[in-house]
Amino acid sequence: MIKDFFFLALNNLRRRQLRSWLTMIGIFIGIAAVVSLISLGQGLQDFITVQFEQLGGDKIIIQSKTLGPPGSATSESLILTKEDLDLIKNVNDVESAEGVLIKTGPVKFKDEVKVGLVMGVSQEYLDLFGDIDSLKTIEGRQLKDSDKSKVVVGYNHVFGDLWEKKAKVGDTLEIEGEGFKIVGVLKKQGNPYDDNSVWMQKDVLGELLSVQNEESQIIAKTKKNTDPEKVAEEIKRKLRKFRGEKEGQETFSVQTAGQLLESFQSIFGVVQAVLVGIAGISLLVGGIGIMNTMYTSVLERTKEIGTMKAIGAKNSHIMLIFLFESGLLGLIGGVIGVGIGLGLAKSAQYIAAAALGTDLLQASLNPMIFIGALSFSFVIGSLSGLLPAIQASKLRPVDALRYE
């Protein structure tokens, strides 16, 4: 009998195709918006999670508290120093620690000048991240401590459109009036900051910029079988005492990779919830549209309802027929919405890759997103048709047959 009700409801929708399509517009617009936003959001979250996993749960990041990126601090009271680095190296359960110098400045290649990120690193710093893909080269080799006049460049220098005439391994870049030979090209990271960056030996960059006693960021690696959270607290306590700062008024931050990931996920979760909430307004409008259509359908089919009741149809049978109709409106609208949403998400991914040269924007194809969207659209449709279905089921056969 359920099967019969289903096909009867489907047939009723076919007889009113134009009205059915117009009713579903609100549903599939809402579902398309929700699916595209969640898909892109989940894709971005997955990308960031992979990056943090590669960083390693045993890493602790220490940097100045500034509004800008690492390396933007200018006040002496904010800047981390080599003395801070030496102190961190001697903290219990810290296996190793190394700093990086990060600056933004002009980089010249032939007759072109671009402003980009210049990273000053040491061999020890590179060894800390030996397993991370972002520090692996696809051409040439990685830096050594002996490379005083050599650099490794991001992907866009050689394979992107950063320069009008692409650079290659063996070419020379000019930084602060000094020439540096390119010895390696890093793998593509998917964001312009890293893919446009230049990496050189830290002491050399310090000499160029006259910042010999500065560390933009310090990375500490904990020993095996230790709790990074406890080690981070110990680093914070000792660093606070060494710099003469009060608790809660530190000019630096100490975070584990896990804490950074949690912070990102919390912030991103709120943003995503707001965006989905806005998109959900379309679903509300679509639900109201279904309810309006079903009320109209009840009025149009009053005599039909009377006839069905006169030949033995129960209230529950009439109610199920109308619930099937409203649920199908929601479900079909959801299927169309999922298709449109996936298309929008993949289009955004391709546009970002083509126009911005970034892989950060990825459309997640997690089946749970689509199953959830379809289930939600069916529930919205069914709930929207609940009141009209109840009204239809309560019609008295005599009154229904007399209805004009």
Image (spheres, helix red, strand yellow):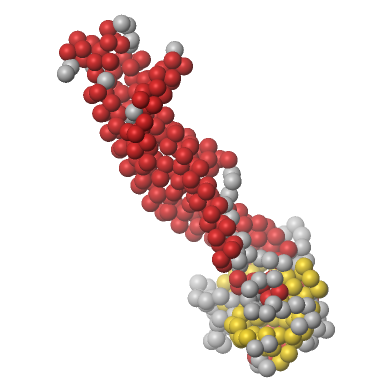
Above or below, 78 relative to 385: below
State the quadrant of the C terminus: top left
Q: Is residue 114 left or right of residue 280?
A: right
Q: Tell me if 298 is positioned left or right of 127 in this view.
A: left
Task: Please identify the quarter of the rendering in which residue 394 is found.
Answer: top left
> Could you tell me if residue 218 is visible in this image?
no
Q: Position of residue 211 (x, y in %)?
A: 65, 89
- Residue name at image x 77 percent, y 68 percent: 138
Q: Between residues 141 and 100, which one lies in front from this camera angle?
A: 141
* Front in this rendered view, residue 273 or 6: 6
- Which quadrant of the structure image shows residue 239? bottom right
Q: From the image, which quarter does the N terminus lie in? A: top left
Residue 127 image position (x, y, % from top left): 78, 70
Task: Give the total number of marks visible in the rendering.
Answer: 0
Question: Relative to residue 153, is residue 133 depicted above or below?
Answer: above
Q: Residue at x 47, y 34 (%)?
A: 375
- The vertical placement of 251 against 377, above or below, is below
**Residue depicted at x 21% and y 15%:** 400
